[in-house]
Amino acid sequence: MSSTSYKSLFLLIDCNNFYVSCERLFRPDLIGKPVVVLSNNDGCIVSRSPEAKALGIPMGAPEFQVRPLLKKYDIEVFSSNYELYGDISHRVMQAVSSIVDGLEQYSIDECFVRLAPAHIPNAFEIAKSIRLRVQKWTGITVSIGIAQTKTLAKLANHIAKKNTSGIFFLNGTEAQHDNLFKKIPVSEVWGIGRHTLPKLERFAIHTVYDLKKADDTWVKSRLTITGLRTVMELRGIPCIDEDNAPVPRRTLVSSRSFGSKIFDIESLQQAVSSFASRAAEKLRHEKLLAGGIAVHIRTSRQHTPFVNETVQQTFLYPTNNTETFIKAAISAVKVMYKSETPYAKAGIMLFDLVSETNVQGALLTLGTQVEDKKRIALMKSLDKINAVHGRHTIHYAAEGLGEQDWHMKQKNRSPRLTTDWTELATAQCKK
């Protein structure tokens, strides 16, 4: 089928082994060698180089369980360096946006692009240009799937990763597509999670082809309208797009296990203040406001007695002001804190989220409009400075200064070479 006959066409651009690729950018000596990157607090493996995969290092495995293998094969191990990864991700997206409009970032290492009708006939050439430019500008290799729906583009990207070209255009006949789908496990379909998979397998739905041919009534009753949209997308009918995208998020969570157990209330308050500040920044980036905040603190599950407490506070009117969130978080900790308790994790959840442009007015806000404008201007300045000079350049004192016991374990973190002046790479000229 000619690409000119498509009414819509999507590209799914995915960075290959993204975290590992970021680490190799500044360590070319690691190219061709096995490398893994660990999750928060150096817990589990979240990224593997092809060489590590070939050695049988499983994705998601706790580091301590595979430590003997890591040592046996002399595998390079890195702690997650989120500031570096976030900055490289931003550069990748800029490279893509320099060629096409309509970029929709899906995750730190993935984005969708819906091609304009005039560009559809040149889809493959555009994909080649994107891949070359991202490689040239950032050093990151991407795979690109091209298809007439987002779900199919994700499947095409799955196939592209196995192609030497790194690009796969799902533009054959329906019979050709079905032959491909019969060989791909249903678990590779976008939106089919580990909880859904057993349900499908009980009804003999094992491949992408099986799901595509499933009865609509059965799909809707078992997988809801969301599952039916996925099936329609597999049939080439765009259902997941700007006009009928999934419902916007209603909550935003910022939570983390501590690097070490903490016993004092001051450290707990610093931790939840930091999480509240980070969540507020994300909220403003997404142009959302929160109607309330929930704060939780807990011990490890192995501790006796297990302590797990939550306190909620609803705001008089929706906000995304960092100071408001921090004050509420500190007050919540005061209510929940128990002395001599080894706290292992804390977090905050912002709930009842609404768009900045869709807020219902209230009489209570009339008398505070001048102060609210000052707070909004302050938050904009805060975000702008941190965006230019690096995250946490300016922050609230309540978040603590310097390294703290509750900070993540990052024993093997590489330097933040692109975002921290104190960790810039040093170039040497040797004769």
Image (cartoon, rainbow, N blue to C red):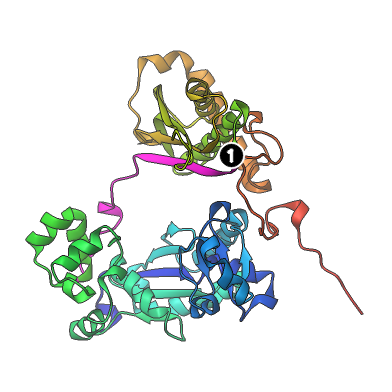
* Image position of 357 (left or right of 326): left
Q: Which residue is mark 1?
A: 261
Q: Position of residue 257 (x, y in %)?
A: 52, 44
Q: Nearer the viewer, residue 342 or 431?
A: 342
Percent of width and height locating residue 76: 63, 70
Q: Quadrant of residue 249?
A: top left
Give the answer, above or below, for where 240 lies relative to 139. above
**Range drawn in magenta:** 235-261
Quadrant of the image occupied by residue 107: bottom left
Q: Is residue 320 magenta?
A: no
Question: Can see residue 122?
Answer: no
The foreground one among 370 and 378 is 378
Which residue is pictured at 39% across the width and 64% down the height?
112
Quarter of the image that includes the N terminus: bottom left
Magenta segment includes 255: yes
Answer whether residue 45 is visible to the viewer in this image.
yes
Q: Is residue 422 or residue 233 the one in the foreground?
A: 422
